[in-house]
């Protein structure tokens, strides 16, 4: 969780290894995160997901009302190794 502990929290990089899926771990993890004392009282929680919309809806997440207000910078190639000449 990336948060200012006052108004905003971003849930990032959540996944369950495929060898452990189907055991309820994602639900358990979300229960722990959502009930964590330092995160209570946040005005806005956000996350990005490719395929777990139904899981997050169970915890109150919904699609943005005004996605046109959200902006980002995406450096798709940032993790590719750069060629360096010596």
Image (spheres, rainbow, N blue to C red):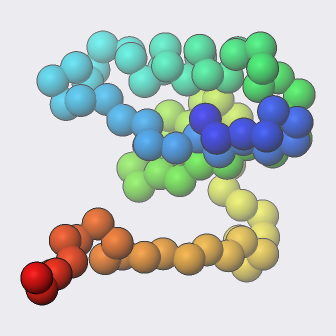
Left or right: residue 42 compared with residue 24: right
| Image quarter of residue 56 | top right
In the image, farthest residue toward the bottom = 85
In the image, farthest residue toward the left = 86
Left or right: residue 2 compared with residue 26: right
The answer to whether residue 66 is above or below residue 9 is below
| Image quarter of residue 63 | bottom right
Question: Can you say which quadrant of the picture contains the N terminus?
Answer: top right
Q: Nearer the viewer, residue 56 or 13?
A: 13
Residue depicted at 79% across the width and 40% down the height: 4
Residue 51 rendering spot, x and y as whole percentages? 39, 50
The answer to whether residue 26 is above or below residue 50 is above
Q: Is residue 57 visible?
A: no
Residue 70 rendering spot, x and y as whole percentages? 71, 72
Residue depicted at 27% across the width and 20% down the height: 22
Residue 15 rendering spot, x and y as whole percentages? 36, 35
Q: In this figure, what is the number of numbered marks?
A: 0
Residue depicted at 43% across the width and 24% down the height: 26
Residue 14 rendering spot, x and y as whole percentages? 43, 37
Question: Can you say which quadrant of the picture contains the C terminus?
Answer: bottom left
| Image quarter of residue 65 | bottom right
Q: Nearer the viewer, residue 45 or 84?
A: 84
In the image, farthest residue toward the front = 86
The answer to whether residue 14 is above or below residue 65 is above
């Amino acid at each position: 969780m990336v948060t200012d502990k006052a108004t905003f929290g971003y849930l990032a990089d959540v996944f369950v290894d495929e060898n452990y899926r189907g055991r309820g771990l994602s639900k358990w993890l979300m229960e722990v995160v959502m009930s964590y004392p330092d995160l209570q009282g946040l005005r806005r929680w956000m996350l990005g997901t490719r395929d777990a919309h139904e899981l997050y809806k169970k915890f109150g997440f919904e699609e943005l009302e005004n996605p046109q207000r959200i902006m980002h910078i995406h450096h798709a190639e940032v993790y590719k190794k750069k060629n360096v000449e010596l």
